[in-house]
Image (cartoon, grey):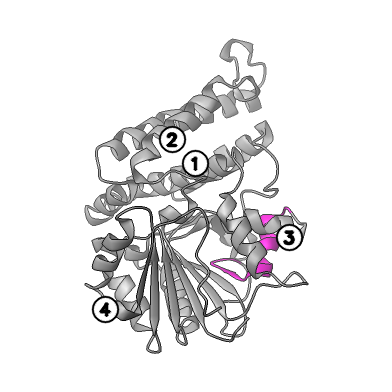
Amino acid sequence: MTNTKITYLLGAGASALALPVVADMPHRMLVVLNYLKETPDYVINASAITNDHIRGIHGQQQGFYKDFEWLIENTKKHASVDTFAKKLFITKKRSDLLRLKALLTIYFILEQQMHDADPRYDSFIASLIEPGPKMPPNVKILTWNYDFQFEKAYSAYSENNTLHENQRELRVTPSDFPSPSTDHFSISKLNGTTSVYTTERGGTVYQLLKDMSSKPTFNLLVELLQSYHNLKVGHDQYESMLCFAWENSHHTKFVLDEACEDVNGTEVLVVIGYSFPFFNRLVDRRIIGSMPKLKKIYFQAPDEGADIMRNSFRSIRDFSDANIGLLRQTDKFFLPHEL
């Protein structure tokens, strides 16, 4: 493996074999909601409630289902859930934005626990990983996704199913671990991640999900419901780590600052499943502007998607066609020959 500095920039398409892209999200949300409503393990018979604890859980469930239906209906009305979130942010509907982020946090945890990781992450890791296990220090990952697909796939190599420990090994930001470094492999999540920042634990990033290998259990659901309540009401001690980059929160600002410093030496950029949407443009310009040594770019997406990505990129930075590669096969993440 060479010492060429390679950066991957991932969008929703990079997790599309496990998680829904924009058009499919309302349907997949409804599938998860119906799963919770209809699976016997999660259904509490209201007529059989015998104590206050179960009564409280039942009440939280019903409130969560109602809010989930609200998110599904509003996602249908907008180009994407991100668009709806931006609308709530601009119109200063803080309580609804908190509710949206709390719902997305719980939804993505449940969705990922119901399915295996996108197999392309496994293939990618298998190609690059070295004994230790150790990922190559000249490779950096920037992702607009708040999922834990990479961590879930990597757990098969670390032989540890704890999300917390796999984020430590992969140097994921934001998390409780050291920020990215030019001397290490790292993953920077530009839109945050599905976890909770809590001052109750001394100002730490708390993982709602412990074991990535198990299917959703009733006990997990109970913990998620309680956390959902705290996040939804904006409890002073709890804050969602799912933060859209355009919010310019202290969490996203920290991730962006660290990521831009980390990718400064990038020579090759591989963009997978990311279309450079207009409302991310200021952030994208800063990221790409932090790569003064950039020599080659590869765009990977099916059909005309790669052409669209290239054309959108040109509104951010002019780049010669001679140094651009368009890749339309998406069964595996592209590994440039410069690696």
Whether 196 is drawn above or below 26: the answer is: below
- Residue 29's label in the rendered image is 2
- The quadrant in which the N terminus is found is bottom right
Tell us which disc is closer to us: 2 or 3. 3
Spatial separation of the CA atoms under disc 1 and disc 2:
7 Å
What's the residue at 33%, 46% (across, down)?
A: 81
| SS label for mark 2 | helix
Tell us which disc is closer to us: 3 or 1. 3
Spatial separation of the CA atoms under disc 4 and disc 1:
35 Å
Q: Quadrant of residue 127?
A: bottom right
Residue type, mark 3 in image: Tyr
What's the residue at 52%, 83% (across, down)?
A: 5
The residue tagged 1 is 107
- Residue 317's label in the rendered image is 4
Spatial separation of the CA atoms under disc 2 and disc 3:
30 Å
Residue type, mark 1 in image: Tyr
Residue type, mark 4 in image: Arg
Q: Check disc 3: other Cα within 10 Å, few if <14, some if 14-19, many if 20+.
A: some
Query: Sequence-wise, which precedes: disc 4 or disc 3?
Result: 3
Part of the protein shown in magenta: 161-175
Between 241 and 274, the residue placed more toward the observer is 274
